[in-house]
């Protein structure tokens, strides 16, 4: 047995030894230690649902997604290690199979799951292989992972329970193998517990302050003229780029959001009409875009702009499950030479102005700023007002 393997067994044995007195001892090959006594949960009226994104690895990758990505999941080895396969499944038509590429890899795949504070959640997955682990970090009360020494060539269910701390709003769910222990498979992942409250739909921001909010979508056409106008006028903007253009030129988006109050938010992966997609695909679209923005810019979005302003009740819940507090449309459009205000009169306090990264954006910004100043208003930072 390798040094790494010996260390693993000793560590988990020590953690298991601290289980609550009187509890039945779980075998070392399936650790179920659940940590300290649970804090109050959301109560018996809160529905228990599965919060995992793409739990059965059945959701197809959205258009414009990174090549080789696993929808809903971030795998450290990328497509060189992790793939969705139909060869061996626990249920359905697909499962995740990971083959660690070298001696320094455990083949970890993980996702961020939005949770409620002071609440008990149960994570589980069906796994196949040797020394497979399932756990969660960032709970506020982290516990040992569930793991198995071997599934004997079949499928085995791993289960672990955790209680979130008073400040926990998300946890990192992970599965991985162990060094030099070969490939493993995962299917039917669950994180069971109460869902976050649905996101709030809004087209404007309630405020008595004399401010409006400039928002810029997509990111395909990035012009120096628009960048210069933003810098010269110190305009706070909230931009909603798609992951592909954002990943192509992240430095541009860092520069145009350098004004205090600016932010980079979530606009889905593929710019599809989400109202036509099942909730599982909506959650992949929103969560994967969130992950891309977080990876590129270091801050997780909290606002989702639905493409085409198309959304339904599933969108509000999927957005909340991805950590979004607001699903934001707009009540004015100054894109591509337009000057449409979708209420009587001039711009009003709290209005959200839609624009796009296009070859007309510099003049669109100029026109929107003129309309804002004519109404006795000024642009302000969106996230400073959305609580």
Image: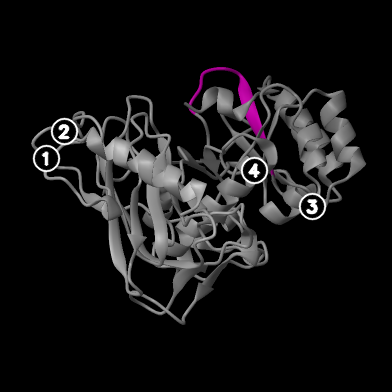
Residue 327 x/y as whole percent:
49, 44
In screen coordinates, is 269 left or right of 138?
Answer: right
Front tag of 1 and 3: 1
Secondary structure of the residue carrying tag 1 is loop
Residue at 67% x, 52% y: name it: 242
Q: Distance between the residues labelled 2 and 3?
A: 51 Å
Q: How far apart are marks 4 and 1 (CA)?
A: 41 Å
Residue that extends furthest to the bottom in the rendered view of this protein: 87
Q: Which residues make up the magenta segment? A: 206-216
Q: How far apart are marks 1 and 3 (CA)?
A: 53 Å
Q: Do the numbered discs 2 and 1 sit on residues whose CB atoms are within 8 Å?
A: yes
Residue 270 within the magenta-colored segment of the rendering: no
> Which residue matches tag 1?
23
**Res. 20 mark:** 2
> Which residue matches tag 4?
295
> Which residue matches tag 3?
248
In screen coordinates, is 159 left or right of 84?
Answer: left
Q: Distance between the residues labelled 4 and 3?
A: 13 Å
Front tag of 4 and 3: 4
For the question of whether residue 215 can be seen, the reply is no
Lower sequence index among marks 4 and 1: 1
Front tag of 4 and 1: 1
Crowding at dot 4, Cα within 10 Å, few <14 / some 14-19 / many 20+, comes out as few
Q: Do the numbered discs 4 and 1 sit on residues whose CB atoms are within 8 Å?
A: no
Front tag of 2 and 3: 2
């Amino acid at each position: 047995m390798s040094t790494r393997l010996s260390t693993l067994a000793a560590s988990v044995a020590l953690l298991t030894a601290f289980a609550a007195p009187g509890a039945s001892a779980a075998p070392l090959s399936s650790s179920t230690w659940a940590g300290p006594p649970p804090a109050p949960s959301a109560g018996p009226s809160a529905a228990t649902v599965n919060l995992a994104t793409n739990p059965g690895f059945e959701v197809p990758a959205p258009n414009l997604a990174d090549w080789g990505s696993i929808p809903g999941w971030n795998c450290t080895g990328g497509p060189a290690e992790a793939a969705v396969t139909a060869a061996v499944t626990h249920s359905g038509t697909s499962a995740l199979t990971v083959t660690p590429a070298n001696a320094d890899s455990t083949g970890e795949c993980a996702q961020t799951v939005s949770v409620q504070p002071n609440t008990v959640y149960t994570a589980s997955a069906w796994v196949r292989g040797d020394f497979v682990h399932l756990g969660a970090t960032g709970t506020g009360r982290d516990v040992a992972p569930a793991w198995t020494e071997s599934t004997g060539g079949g499928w085995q269910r791993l289960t672990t329970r955790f209680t979130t701390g008073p400040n926990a709003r998300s946890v990192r769910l992970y599965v991985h193998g162990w060094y030099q222990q070969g490939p493993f498979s995962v299917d039917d992942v669950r994180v069971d517990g109460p869902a976050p409250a649905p996101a709030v739909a809004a087209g404007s921001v309630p405020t008595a302050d004399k401010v409006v909010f400039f928002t810029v979508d997509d990111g395909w056409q990035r012009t120096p003229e628009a960048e210069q106008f933003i810098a010269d006028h110190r305009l706070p903007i909230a931009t909603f780029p798609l992951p592909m253009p954002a990943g192509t030129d992240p430095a541009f988006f860092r520069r145009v959001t350098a004004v205090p109050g600016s932010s980079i938010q979530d606009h889905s992966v593929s710019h599809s009409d989400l109202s036509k997609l099942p909730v599982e695909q909506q959650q992949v679209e929103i969560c994967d875009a969130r992950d891309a923005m977080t990876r590129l810019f270091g801050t997780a979005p909290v606002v989702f702009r639905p493409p085409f302003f198309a959304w339904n009740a599933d969108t509000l819940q999927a957005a909340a499950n991805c950590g979004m507090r607001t699903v934001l449309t707009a009540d004015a459009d100054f894109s591509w030479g337009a000057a449409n205000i979708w209420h009587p009169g001039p711009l009003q306090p709290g209005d959200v102005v839609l624009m796009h990264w296009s070859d007309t954006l510099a003049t669109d910004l100029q026109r929107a700023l003129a309309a804002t100043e004519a109404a006795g208003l000024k642009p302000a930072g969106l996230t400073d007002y959305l609580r």
